[in-house]
Amino acid sequence: MKKVELLAPAGNFDALKGVIKAGADAVYLGGTLYSARAYADNFTQDEICEGIHLAHVFGRRVYLTVNTLVKEKELDSLYQYMNPLYEEGLDGVIVQDLGVLRFLRSCFPDLPFHASTQMTITGSRGAALVKKEGISRVVPARELSLEEIIKIKEETGLEIETFVHGAMCYCYSGQCLLSSILGGRSGNRGRCAQPCRLPYETGGKKGYLLSMRDMCTIELLPELIESGIDSFKIEGRMKKPAYAAGVTAIYRKYIDRYYEKRAEQRLPLTPDRLMTQKSSGHSALTVSYKVSGEDMDILRSLYIRSEIGAGYYKRHNGREMISMHSPAYQETDGKLLADMEERYIKSGLLRAVKAKIRLVPGEAACLTLVSVEKESIQVTITGDMVQEACRQPLTAEKVRQQMQKSGESPLRAVQVEVEMSSPVFLPVSSLNELRRRALSAMEDAFIFQAGLAYRERKTVPFREPQFTEPKLTQRAFAGQKLSGQKLFHAVVRTPGQLEATLEEGICRIYLDYSLLEGEEGGLFARLSAAKPAQLREAGAEDEYEFYLATPYIVREKDIKYLKKIENAFATGLFTGILIRNFESFLFFRETAAREQIVLDANLYIWNREAAAFWQNRAGEFYLPVECNMHEWRDLLKRCPENGMKACAIVYGRLPVMITANCVKKTVGSCNKTGGITMLKDRYQKQFPVYTDCLCCYNVIYNSVPLSLHSLAGSKQAELLANFRLDFTVEEKQEALQVIRYFKGLRAKESEPFYKEYTTGHYKRGVD
């Protein structure tokens, strides 16, 4: 039975050594660039190389986090950053950005790639999509149940890595813009300011409504192991080395205990047994397993919030998952941390070897090192010629002292046998050089024995692309003429918003999938009336185009709603589909033609490689809302000539969080009526929360709408195929006013009638 990997965090070099000593099978860490923990100590390039070598000597793997969205101007620097790490033997890289995946895969074909939880993979379709692009391991969304995780593994064959301990985000990872929009610190760039840990109020009830309890699954380990998960991940790159090592040690203890008990009871875990266990609908665990109260106390005392839970493995959402009263960490046990520091950090990380040195005059000095753990691992190195001593012969004790030194090597000779046939002389410098060469060779032997030597890796030299400076207005995606209604599209979620867009002649209307629920007959009749058959047949330019917008999140239970969209699409009333997640894209890839697929802004095209990923898969894409106007222009200059049209959202309350947990349920109970509730922060700002009771998630919108009216009325509009107005909480009359205002911008520039708005990142961008 292949044992589950225990994957531990390292925010600095002390943490790396500590978690290795505590029993981690693998370590994940970030550099000073491209890491989703920008405020951790992180590693320099040289330190990463040193860390890879050190880990390999102990038979452990190192995974590098390159799990941020990467701007076009940053992309080419990735090669110089990654190349020495690849050559040193980096075991894998964790990525969020599809453009980064394409770029690194083209340069480093032998490097394993892992899909970060920031990719928001919620099902087997999304996992299959990234598998085709070279992903070998997926870290699914943390909101998935154990059953959903098992299904992904069964249907794709990918390795699965899941979190088992540490802090939890309230939002689906990769879908959070709250910190970014409020303060310019983007979670997609590793700089989250954690506004979810602040107090909020809704319906007269106050508390830390968005603060998730920390995860602790130590009591679930047997079931998680038997599910077939490949790697258990501990969160904590921002935390102290003693914390990372202490938590790793406890999980190491109970993982090993589980396998020992299973071996004692001779209970092999086979795929057939797994299938029987799952099809029976209950756990067939037979291994006796119990976590001691003392060890639970240790975990609670190692910098964890006072309230803990098991995450989403067993439940979809609920008040019990939230730290309602305080998001603060409980007081850490100083004595315990000091003990962990002494045990795993200060005591050093060494691997024991036995040494035998032969010094015979007239022969080359000969040093053999043998592993204490496994005697078959050994090396023999010869050095300078040994001479007969004339005046000051070497003593066995002196030789032994020199051989027991280790310098920077993690190996130490715990036993030294000295063979000298007569008084001999050899310079101390020669002894030291012999020892250094032997230790280096022994380190290589340990690495080779662990299967972690990557000497035959292929590298494709990087050639910096040459770009011309074409006039953007001549490009395929340069857009249509700035003439009246053809410029504006709109997203609607309510019948009133739909009526407003029809009355004002918006040429393309994206209907939220929820409008199909229970109203197909009446909705279809209304759309047919708005789009007369003779106009459709004649192909008149002024006819309406109706598109359907998928849910923001699609999980296995939600596929039925994609099938509803598919059935509606088959009626011929709808021209295309607005895609908001990988699951939906793969579902509709065979149904819709490339030009009928539009990618929403949350699919994050930040660089030319990400655009290239989608170029044969979609006809249009929306520019990312976290990039500024200069970064948009930079991206569009370097996009491939693929005809994929670039579009921009110019009005609407941006979704700042998509959450599995439900604000209404947290403060009360689920009444399955959906709709809008208001969430108030400490500054009395009101954030609308849309409860989607079909796919069971919340959308938290910004307190004020985005308004890029200056862009819509400027010459920069020539860069884009169209602008989009997103209607969320607006009633029909307000939607009408918004449409009329934007349609009138070309005739007369003026400030909008709504007094509060934001230009988002259009001017400021994110770091």
Image (spheres, rainbow, N blue to C red):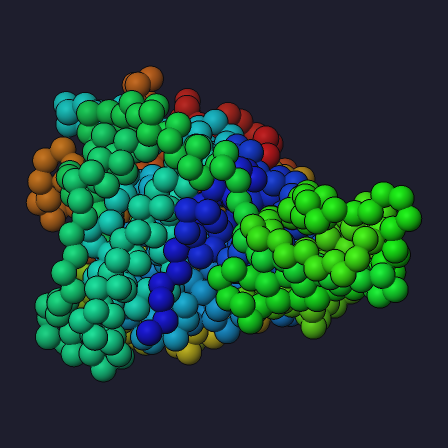
Above or below, 572 relative to 543: below
450 or 377, nearer to the observer: 377
Residue 317 placement, left or right of 632: left
Does residue 78 show up? no
Q: Quadrant of residue 261?
A: bottom left
The residue nearer to you, when weighing 347 against 643, is 347
Asked if one can make out residue 399 in the rendered structure from this viewpoint, the answer is: yes
The residue at the far right in this view is 390
Q: Residue at x 78, y 50 (%)?
A: 431
Position of residue 636 measured from the top left corner of the image (x, y, whole percent): 67, 52
Residue in the foreground of this view, choosing between 614 and 383: 383
Q: Position of residue 577 (x, y in %)?
A: 40, 64
Q: Residue at x 18, y 71 (%)?
A: 265
Whole-percent x and y of residue 764? 59, 30
**Residue at image coords 23%, 30%:** 306
**Residue name at image x 41 percent, y 22 percent:** 755
Determine whether 585 is above or below 180 in the image: below
Q: Is residue 270 left or right of residue 75?
A: left
Quadrant holding the N terminus? bottom left
